[in-house]
Image: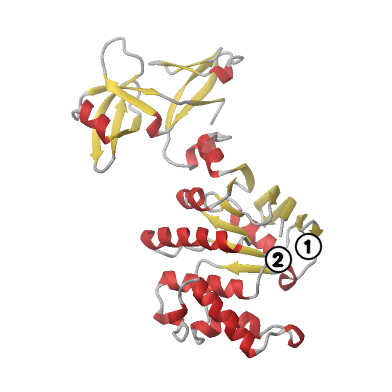
Amino acid sequence: MAIEVRNIQKRFGGYTALDKVSLNFPAGELTALLGPSGCGKTTLLRVIAGLEQPDAGTVLLDGEDASSRHLRERQVGFVFQHYALFKHMSVFENIAFGLRVKPRGIRPSDAQIREKVTQLLELVQLDWLADRYPAQLSGGQRQRIALARALAVEPRVLLLDEPFGALDAKVRKELRRWLRRLHDTLHVTSIFVTHDQEEALEVADRVVLMNKGRVEQLGTPDEVYNRPASPFVYGFLGNVNLFHGRVHEGTLDTGGARFDAPEHGDAREAQGIGFVRPHDLEVRRYAPGIEGVAARLIRVHAIGPLARLEMESGDDGQVIEALISAERFAQLQPIQGEMLAVRPQRLRVFVNAN
């Protein structure tokens, strides 16, 4: 099922949760709604589900206005962060619940329910837990049962609100890989809310970056990470170094170094900020006349295939972080306290960025 939202607005008192949001969610894709707390992503998910009514705007399911449709009529499966399993029911009965409460005319037989639940338990690889109760399961197992229960009614849309937010880091990583494989098997149109950048970039087909009730950028994980549309997107998706300065005729002048910014060839003495990811910084020993920003090495973390260098700019005391390979670190052998020169290998400049 394809989903479209048009000019959705939602306010809670004086707070604007959604400000004229318009988006398309193609059928069969897994889309992540990503952003900081309070940006509107959960509100948008609840509007699509029918759990919240927008103040203005339209939700379309397969091109048809669903604004007046009840939650049950939207054929939506919803998975919450805290599982919401029935504690007094076994795993089997939790999954079977949505099938048992269907109207008599369309309710499956007991044999059909048993077959369906067994298939779902096998799908989520927990068929051996059918007779247990939620309190006897781990957090990861509970969330997989919650997903199986949502899938039991064969939803055309699967909505997940911070589905792994209550789990520890190791289990989160395992489950997000599992969710991606599950989606590739079922191809149900899915939207999940997260504030975890790595989770969104690893799992989703497309990522919607939200901020203050608006969409900052929509694109594939590669597009939003490597071609951020705004300073907010650049700063939200991973660590970033900022170089403040003046942009004039295609050059960013930080006072201590000058960098090319050809996309701003028409700029005239404008304030600008250069954004550079740590792995896009070249690090060399400092020497008079060498190109780059002079910085003093203050801390090194060199374990594994990458070494993280924390430096302090000689001009303004700004902390600069660089990631270099273990091989490059071994060649350089920097000593804490010595001066190094850093130069961006890839730089994105935003003019008049705040």
User: Element under label 2?
Assistant: loop
- Report which residue position mark 1 lands on: 66
Q: Residue at x 55, y 77 (%)?
A: 119
Q: Quadrant of residue 214?
A: top right
The N terminus is located in which quarter?
A: bottom right
Q: Residue at x 57, y 20 (%)?
A: 263
Query: Left or right: 330 with respect to 270?
Result: left
- Report which residue position mark 2 lands on: 50
Q: Quadrant of residue 93?
A: bottom right
Whole-percent x and y of residue 63? 79, 56
Marks 2 and 1, Cα distance to the nearest angstrom?
9 Å
Q: Residue at x 47, y 59 (%)?
A: 176
Q: Quadrant of residue 341?
A: top left
Amino acid type, callout 2 = Gly
Image vertical order of residue 347 relative to residue 112, above or below: above
Whole-percent x and y of residue 235? 48, 38
Check whether the beta carbons of the residues at disc 2 and disc 1 lie within 8 A of each other.
yes
Return the residue nearer the eye: 163 or 122.
122
Query: Left or right: 28 with respect to 328?
Result: right
